[in-house]
Image (cartoon, rainbow, N blue to C red):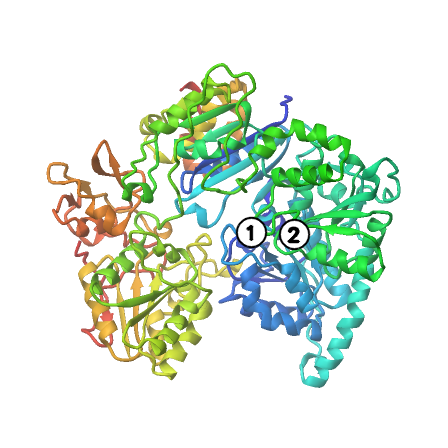
Amino acid sequence: MSTPSLDIVVAGVGGQGTVLASKLLAQAALIESLSVRTAETIGMAQRGGSVLGHVRIRADLPAASPLVPLNAADLLIGFEPAETVRALPYLREGGTVVTAHKPVEPVSATLGDAAYDGTAEVAYLRSCEGAGRIGRLVLVDGDALCEKLGSTKVLNVVLIGAALKAQNRESARETYEQAIESLVKPRFRALNKQALAEGMSA
Amino acid sequence: MSVELCMGNQAIALAALKAGVNVVSGYPGTPSSEVLETVSARNPGAVHVEWSTNEKVALEVGAGAAFAGARALVTMKQVGLNVASDALLSLPYLGVVGGLVLLVADDPGPISSQTEQDTRQFAAFAKVPLLDPSTPEEAFAMVEDAFELSERFGTPVIVRPTTRICHSSVPLETAFTYEAHAVSGFERGSRWVVFPRRAYEGHLEILERLPRVAGAFNTSAYNAIHGGRESADSSAHSNSGGGEGDARRDDTGGAAHIGIAAGGISYAYLMDALSSIPDAADVRVFKVGTPFPFPEARALEFLEGLDEVLIFEECEPFIERELLLVAGRHHLPILVRGKLTGDVNPAGESSVSLVREQVLAWLGQRGLPAAAAATATAAGATAATSTTAATTAAAPAPIPAAAGESRSQEPQPQLPARPPVLCAGCPHRASYYAVKKALRGRTAVYSADIGCYTLGNALPLDMVDTCVCMGAGFTVPQGMAWAEPEVLHLGFVGDSTFFASGLTGVANAVYNQTDVTLCVLDNSITAMTGSQPHPGTGLRMSSDATERDAANALKIPAVLKALGVEHVTEVNPFDFDTSVAAVRAAVDFKGVSALVFKAPCITVSKPAPQPEVDQSTCTRCKACIKAIGCPALVVREGEVRIDTTLCYGCGLCVRVCPFDAITASVPSTASATPATSTVPGASTPSATSTTSSPSDGTPSKASL
């Protein structure tokens, strides 16, 4: 199956599972015999800081470098609203944004008086869609889906499922199930496949 | 064919195995840690793999193996090379028999480091050849070559990936059969004893060796000269081999007289940037894959006929200085532009967007017609590149408005800052809070060290006044104590840091009878770098000893006592009242006192039942949040709540609430603290002290 070049940015908070998300996207590309290059945030920022994952998929020759340039991402997968807005400069004009709308409050915001609840960020994203900056915005109630699945750890796979649906790539479901087989520990595979299905039907 | 998705660090590890490496040693440090972990995970059984106590030890272990004819890989991050530098500077004088390859990962940005130092400069200082990969694929090839280079020239060789190589994943052909390098055995001789006379001879040997290495580098495919776009394909081998002989091809317009040199990941960024700049293919490109010793003949070939060159490289202007040297030595009338001339960013990470912006600005200055068109098409890209948004810039640049948009876009809301923080349930939070409570109203300076616990600096804990380098958490307070004796001085180091660089500081304090309190934050793991074991855990990395060996774990209180510290107390920081009392007793002890706060990292312990906030009792005063700043304490719909996705059930907040509105969901038992360790020797003790009542050794009953 031939897929055109696809630059994806994954944005979230350390601990939310962004690294596995970019690895799953890359593994799926590998299964589809595409070229792929990723860059993950591993290290200090994993302790609750802002983290970005870059995934660059090409049909034939790989991208030269692993980082998605600014204004170049076709798809931005956001794990919480402020991080989605923070990563928006990476999105190309009219690109697709799939984001969870439940905020993760940083301690600094909880401490201060300026409350952060994500509503301003979601409104901003909507206005970006209205203005054409974002071509398609998909807001995912990741919280509810995770609750339904009985685990908070599968937000990453839920969002991947939602992203596949947003790109009309439901047919890639088996590929992603294979990717889960390759990268997820056996006892969590069924749960993750379920999360993929939930995300795709959300 | 066996193609698998490999992170750069995994690729490096597999290359070492493919080269038949016999001994692998290292000390954890982002972004290098996964190299040694992968060797351990893929160990066919014959490789000795160890986390050494620090980088100096690791390098000397590797050197010993290489003296005996084995192939050795030694891994560390760039600041680790500072620790290993004593050995590194001597080793090229002695030389090696078996291949000795140092994998030193640099961290431009920096993203997870205390410096942005450049290992290429260190290699030049130490007179050790260095290979600088631009992709994970090339890192794979270079590591294999590095072993051969090391043996051919009898010198240690450094391979220097950067974060975006180490933590970048690519599909890689990984099928090979491990064949252990045949170890020749140690041959005695005067060459191995570095007396001054030997050092003089060794210096001459180095000076004779380096030009020969440079000669090999001059013809190496890792140093390539080509036109811009035709070699934008970046698979390792085409990267390193592409386009030789193109150097004198250009004869069109101004572009024929300009060139760009780049090394490491900057070369990959350059290739991506050039692919989107019309007509930039005429710009001659020099890829420098072996920056030391510098391939001068190759550089001359690149510079021939040029009047201006631009250099892209992260960290220091290394290639830039070398090219200036070459141009000077050969009287070439060439303007060399780069960091020294302010044409590219002097510090921080680079990116495709930055390189593109800088190339376009340069072409524009040269008045090239192609540049104008390119600048117009890139208006959007350049507008957003005023900050290095490639990493985690707090304030992203404004987003360019869509052309012909119909509806207006709201202004972007002010985004909350999101620095890294101590995890919910982290025992360091409890330790710092106990010290803070115990010393309220007294003047104290808190010196900490490198590790997760540096994050105790953040509000509201605000418990880290200094952090310099590994080990300084125990030594900086000693100097302060002599300078300002009327103030309390406490030092904090982690358990892995204690063994890496803390011991000499303890001995120094005891020897000099310095009035300080040395605190070990023992979470039974090297946490910040991804949960590596250390001497206090008993866990080893070699395939024959992956079982945790509690009996073999070094006991930190016993080590402290053996080093002569009279007052040593071990406490479980979640045993809060005991901890507070222990802190007071320690600081009031005249002379060297030590506290060991022992409770396992949440990555190696199981969560305990979560406490609950009684909303009818809670006054929304946020005292809990203001005291301990736990990320699991959140305000939603005006109520203080516990984020059940983050809470680890440590119970510290239960102790903190002035209105008893937070209650443990399970009546207070030992299991109410995250004391269920999966690491031996990581049990959570009640206070055991040589100066207070002796312990019965049973796990503590939580007082929370």
- Residue A193 appears left or right of B565: right
Q: Which mark is residue B1?
A: none
Please state the horizontal and vertical placement of residue B701, each as a whole percent of the image: 18, 58
What residue is drawn where x is 71% and y is 43%? Answer: B236
Secondary structure, mark 1, is helix
Q: Is residue B279 at all visible to an observer of this figure?
A: no
Please state the horizontal and vertical placement of residue B215, each as a whole percent of the image: 83, 60
- Parent chain of label 1: B
Kindly indicate whether the residues beneath marks 2 and 1 are on one polypeptide chain: yes
**Residue B503 or residue A179, whichever sits in front:** B503
Q: In this picture, is B206 found above or below A185?
A: below
Please state the horizontal and vertical placement of residue B302, each as a whole percent of the image: 82, 49
Q: Amino acid at mark 2?
A: Lys
Q: Which mark is residue B38?
A: 1
Give residue B570's quadrant in the image: bottom left
Quarter of the figure that contains the N terminus of chain B: top right
Q: Which residue is mark 2?
A: B339
Secondary structure, mark 2, is loop
What residue is drawn where x is 52% and y is 35%? Answer: A22
Please state the horizontal and vertical placement of residue B337, each as a whole percent of the image: 71, 50
- Residue B643 appears left or right of B46: left
Q: Residues within 10 Å of mark 2 (few under 14, many from 20)?
A: many
**Residue B155 or residue B38, whichever sits in front:** B155
- Residue B18 appears left or right of A67: right
